[in-house]
Each structure stands twice: as structure tokens, then as C-alpha cells.
Image (spheres, helix red, strand yellow):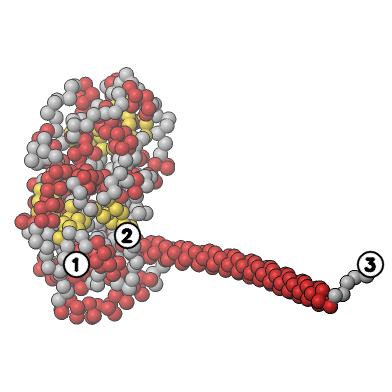
């Protein structure tokens, strides 16, 4: 997974696989937490069968060429007829594309379908000729994974294609898990087909086969496993406790406004939210005027709230974070469960509110319409299963719809058709997690594919592209302020890599200094110990010498004493024989 935000989409799957005894390794970017302040190892820390690995990408000479080719292919995709009514998507991707490549795209030969297809075919050949990352090859050799599941893969200019290529080169079975409702329609391409593509519903089947030309036999429908956690869930707190915690009125209903990710260069949704609240407060309906409002900011757009203050508005609370741990999940669920209606512009919270059974509202205004109706996935929420939200095109219409939701009881079967078709196509009582797990295990039981080898043609093309890659690298390195976002991101990535290398070198230097200091202390301690040993040995030797000297002296004295006794005895014997007697 590219970032930890994906974890909440697959936590139920990971827990189920681990409970069945399977070993799981997660490869992610530690630094890209997407609004979560939770230590990632703690999120699944109760499951020893799950291990974390952290992405270690080092840009090289090929990085600029790879980034340019991939984002250009993503850009060319939005010139297909299906996107004729979605110019905002094309403009958004164009912000990542180098200006020179945008100008080439507008050349006369590439304005026609045949010329554009030829350009795409050439770029795909170049993309296939790009060398694999050595770090990923080493990881695949080390892990020997039976199945490699990649998500989301479809980010613009995604580098995750390298994970898929390394996995296929080492003979692993591969799968792409579609992470969200808009990934197939408004992101990048599936540039290399995995063995399976796991989708939510028939709408995504159509997207995979028509927009990405994935063979139909590789597409498997599982339902939206990420939403299983909201079915049949019950709140942990009462409504009074929840409202008291968030300082919302307990005696009146409240509306939930869920902010959207939207796209870069979008007007500030934070400023719009304030205007939206002011319009509600000016309504003719006293119930709507006095209703509470809970605003959940989007974790990727917190910066825009620095200039917007809601504290002067009565009965308005801004609260919420990415629901990845149990506490944040409970907060999010109770926000949906206890609200009387949910409002947003273009957010997956529409689907979650529908599952919980709450009325869903949106308003399409000129400044945001391209970010809503200018995308394909927004229209699915208008058509699939009869649609999910009540759409208004003015504040007056929107306020009337909200008043109706506040006044009337919520139908028991509200949104049932939509939820069934979009999130649980095999029935509301059939959890998608089990179907997803079955699809992965079924893939794991299938014959392992032969490792994918580069053809001689690709190897030759790679050799021809090497000087082109060097030129692209030098050209981008010489630009002070790149216009293309893809190169800005690559430059930031290089800076992070250089910083990481410098940090690692500094850490190694300090570790070397600590090791040298430790070794010196050990050497000095050993020298002192050896000196003490030598001094002790010398004392022992001196003591031994003194003992031996005393022993020799004692023995000599003993011998002398013995000789004296023997002389005295002999003298006494002679005297006796001579008759010599001492005078009286």
C-alpha cells in the first residue's frame, strides 16, 4: 500500500487472513500517514503474523524519464471519448505533466485517434523497457510471497507498477485491489495487468474492462470490504453522551457535513462550509435554523482551515480524524449514526452514511460543479440503485430538502437498493471481507505463473534509452522551479532521499564514533586489567620467592642444627671412650 490511509480499507481482510494462519507482510511508506497520528505498528500490533516493511525508494538516473512517461500516459488517457465531458479531470492530470509534453500532445498528428494510439503504443514500449528497482527485486527474493496484492496502483504517475513488475519477475501471483469508488475512473492507468483485479461491483467491472481494457476473466467482484465495519454496528455511547462530548445541542437534531478531498486548485471548501452554515441559519424553517452542525474536515485539506474560524457560530463543532484506530472509528460511526442527515460535495462518506441509513444531501454550485459532475464517479451516486443523494442546485432548494429530512421519519429501506448494488452486490447479509479473502486464497491455490522475463527487444530498447534517461535527469536537475507537479514531487523525493542518506551517514558516523570510544574504553579497561594482573602476578612471584627463601633458610638452619647435634654426640662419645671426665 502506498500510504497508511489504505490500511483502513483492508484491515478486516488482514485480520481475517492472519486469523486463518497466513503470514502477511505490509510494504508501506512510513512518512505518508494521511492525517493519522497513530503509530502504524500499533494498529495491528495484536497480530504477530503481520509484519511491516517500510518503502526504501532511491531515485536514480532513470527516475525522471520514468516519471515523465508514466504521467504522460495517464494524461493521454483523458483524451479518450469517455472523458469528453470531464475536462476538469484532464486539466488536473495536466498539472503534473511537463509543459513540453503537453505541447507535443496538441500536435496535429496526435489530435486524431490513430496518431494518439501510436504515441501511446510507443510510450508503453518505453515504460516496459524501464529497469526494475533493485530494492524491490531484493524484497521479492527475500519474501518469496505466494500472492502480492497491490493497492491502489492507480495514483497518477504511480511507482507501484514497479512492485507489480518485480513480483511478476519473481513468479509471484499478483492482484490489484481497488481501494475506492473513484480509483478506476479518475486516477491513473492499469499499465500492466495483474492476475486478478478485485472490484466492488458491476460498475467497477465495466470500468476495469472498458476504461482499462482488463480481460474480463481477470476481474473478480467481492463487494466493498472496507465498509463491512459499518453494517450492524452499534454505538458505544448514547446520543446524549456523544452530543455532550462534542458540545452539540442534545435536544435538537444535528447535521453532519463531511468534507471532501477534491483536487488541487479547488476553491476552499472551508470557506464554503462557513457560507453553507450561514445559509442554513438564514432559512425560513426554524427547525433548520436551530439545528446543530458537526463538520468533519478532510485530513488532506487541513491547511485551508487555518484561515477559517467557526467558533463564533452557535451550535457548530468541527471534530474528527481519519478513522484508523478504534476510538476514531467509534467517533466517525456515531457521527453518522446520530446525525439527522449528512451533507457533502463529493466524498465517499456519502456511501457510509447510506449504509448507516441516513439521508444524504449534496449541492452543486458553479464553483464546484466541475469537481462533482465533471467526474465520472459522481454520476454513479446519481444512477446506481436509483441514486443515493438528494441533489440541489441552489441554497433555497438545498434548504428545502434538508428541512424535509429533519421533519419526516427516515424510511427503513432508505438507500437499500443503492447499498446492495454498490457495496454488497451478493446481498446485504453477505460480508464482502469473506469474498475478498476467498478471492485471494483462490488465487494463492492457482498454479504459480512462470517468472516474466524481458525480451531481447526490450533489453535493446533499454540500452538505447539510457542516454535519453541521462539527458532527462540532467535537464530536470537544471530547472530551478519545475512547473510539472510530477517533477516537483520527484525533486522532493530526491531531497528526502538525500536527507535520509545524510541522516544515515551522520548516524553511521556517530555510531562509528561511539563504537570507537567504546572500543577505546574497552582497550583502556583491558590494559588496566592486564596491568593489575601483571602487578598481582609480580606480587605473587615475590611472595613465592620470599617463601622459597625462607624455606631454604629454614632448611639450611635445620641442617646446621643437625650437624651441630651430630658433632656434639660424636664428641661426647669420644670423651666417654677416653675416660675423660669433667673436673669436679
> At numbered mark 1, what does the secondary structure look like: helix, strand or loop?
loop
Q: Is residue 135 above or below residue 263?
A: below
Mark nearer the viewer, 3 or 2: 3
Q: Residues within 10 Å of mark 3 (few under 14, many from 20)?
A: few
Q: Is residue 353 above or below residue 145?
A: above
Rendered image: mark on residue 170: 1
Outermost left residue? 217
Query: Distance between the Cα atoms at labels 2 and 1?
Result: 19 Å
Return the disc, 3 or 1, that comes first in the chain's sequence. Answer: 1
- Of the pair 222 and 146, the residue shown nearer to us: 146
Q: Is residue 540 above or below residue 341?
A: below
Which residue matches tag 3?
A: 584
The image shows residue 284 at horizontal and vertical percentages of: 28, 22
Q: Tags 3 and 1 in contact by the CB under 8 Å rule?
A: no
> At numbered mark 2, what does the secondary structure look like: helix, strand or loop?
loop
Q: Residue at x 29, y 34 (%)?
A: 330
Which residue matches tag 2?
A: 55
Mark nearer the viewer, 2 or 1: 1
For residue 525, which quarter of the picture? bottom right
Q: Residue at x 17, y 57 (%)?
A: 147
Judge left or right: residue 133 versus residue 125: right
- Of the pair 362 and 138, the residue shown nearer to us: 138
The image shows residue 187 at horizontal and vertical percentages of: 21, 55
Q: Residues within 10 Å of mark 1 (few under 14, many from 20)?
A: some
Judge left or right: residue 163 versus residue 478: left
Amino acid at each position: 500500500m502506498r500510504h497508511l490511509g489504505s490500511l483502513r480499507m483492508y484491515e478486516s481482510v488482514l485480520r481475517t487472513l492472519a486469523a486463518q494462519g497466513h503470514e502477511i507482510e505490509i510494504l508501506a511508506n512510513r512518512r505518508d500517514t494521511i492525517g493519522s497520528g497513530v503509530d502504524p505498528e500499533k494498529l495491528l500490533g495484536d497480530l504477530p503474523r503481520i509484519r511491516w516493511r517500510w518503502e526504501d525508494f532511491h531515485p536514480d538516473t532513470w527516475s525522471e524519464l520514468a516519471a515523465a512517461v508514466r504521467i504522460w500516459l495517464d494524461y493521454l488517457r483523458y483524451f479518450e471519448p469517455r472523458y469528453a465531458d470531464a475536462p476538469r479531470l484532464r486539466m488536473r492530470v495536466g498539472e503534473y505533466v511537463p509543459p513540453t509534453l503537453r505541447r507535443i500532445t496538441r500536435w496535429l498528428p496526435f489530435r486524431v485517434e490513430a496518431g494518439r494510439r501510436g504515441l501511446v503504443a510507443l510510450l508503453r514500449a518505453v515504460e516496459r523497457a524501464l529497469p526494475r528497482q533493485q530494492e524491490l527485486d531484493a524484497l521479492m527474493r527475500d519474501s518469496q510471497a505466494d500472492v502480492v496484492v497491490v493497492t491502489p496502483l492507480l495514483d497518477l504517475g504511480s511507482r507501484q507498477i514497479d512492485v507489480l513488475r518485480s513480483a511478476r519477475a519473481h513468479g509471484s501471483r499478483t492482484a490489484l485491489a481497488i481501494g475506492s469508488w473513484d480509483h478506476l475512473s479518475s486516477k491513473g492507468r492499469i499499465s500492466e495487468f495483474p492476475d486478478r483485479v478485485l472490484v466492488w461491483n458491476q460498475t467497477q467491472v465495466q470500468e476495469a474492462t472498458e476504461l482499462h481494457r482488463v480481460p474480463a476473466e481477470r476481474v473478480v467482484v467481492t463487494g466493498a470490504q472496507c465498509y463491512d465495519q459499518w453494517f450492524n454496528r452499534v454505538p458505544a455511547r448514547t446520543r446524549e453522551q456523544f452530543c455532550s462530548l462534542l458540545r452539540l445541542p442534545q435536544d435538537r437534531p444535528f447535521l453532519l457535513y463531511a468534507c471532501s478531498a477534491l483536487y488541487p486548485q479547488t476553491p476552499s471548501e472551508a470557506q464554503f462550509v462557513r457560507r453553507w452554515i450561514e445559509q442554513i441559519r438564514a432559512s425560513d424553517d426554524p427547525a433548520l435554523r436551530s439545528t446543530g452542525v458537526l463538520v468533519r474536515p478532510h485530513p488532506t485539506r487541513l491547511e485551508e482551515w487555518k484561515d477559517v474560524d467557526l467558533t463564533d457560530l452557535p451550535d457548530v463543532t468541527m471534530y474528527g480524524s481519519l478513522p484508523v484506530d478504534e476510538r476514531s472509528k467509534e467517533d466517525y460511526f456515531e457521527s453518522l449514526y446520530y446525525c439527522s442527515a449528512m451533507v457533502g460535495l463529493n466524498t465517499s462518506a456519502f456511501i457510509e452514511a447510506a449504509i448507516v441509513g441516513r439521508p444524504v444531501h449534496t449541492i452543486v454550485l458553479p464553483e464546484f460543479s466541475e469537481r462533482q459532475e465533471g467526474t465520472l464517479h459522481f454520476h454513479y451516486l446519481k444512477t446506481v440503485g436509483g441514486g443515493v443523494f438528494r441533489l440541489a442546485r441552489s441554497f433555497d432548494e438545498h434548504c428545502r430538502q434538508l428541512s424535509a429530512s429533519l421533519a419526516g421519519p427516515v424510511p427503513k429501506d432508505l438507500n437499500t437498493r443503492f447499498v446492495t448494488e454498490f457495496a454488497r452486490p451478493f446481498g446485504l447479509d453477505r460480508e464482502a471481507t469473506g469474498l475478498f479473502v476467498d478471492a485471494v486464497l483462490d488465487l494463492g491455490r492457482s498454479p504459480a505463473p512462470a517468472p516474466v522475463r524481458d525480451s531481447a527487444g526490450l533489453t535493446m530498447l533499454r540500452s538505447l534509452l539510457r542516454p535519453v534517461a541521462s539527458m532527462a535527469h540532467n535537464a530536470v536537475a537544471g530547472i530551478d522551479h519545475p512547473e510539472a507537479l510530477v517533477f516537483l514531487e520527484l525533486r522532493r523525493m530526491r531531497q528526502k532521499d538525500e536527507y535520509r542518506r545524510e541522516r544515515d551517514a551522520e548516524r553511521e558516523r556517530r555510531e562509528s564514533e561511539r563504537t570507537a570510544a567504546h572500543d577505546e574504553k574497552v582497550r583502556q579497561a583491558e590494559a588496566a586489567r592486564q596491568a593489575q594482573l601483571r602487578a598481582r602476578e609480580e606480587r605473587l612471584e615475590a611472595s613465592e620467592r620470599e617463601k622459597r627463601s625462607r624455606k631454604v633458610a629454614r632448611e639450611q638452619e635445620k641442617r646446621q642444627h643437625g650437624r651441630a647435634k651430630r658433632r656434639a654426640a660424636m664428641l661426647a662419645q669420644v670423651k666417654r671412650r677416653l675416660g675423660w671426665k669433667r673436673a669436679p
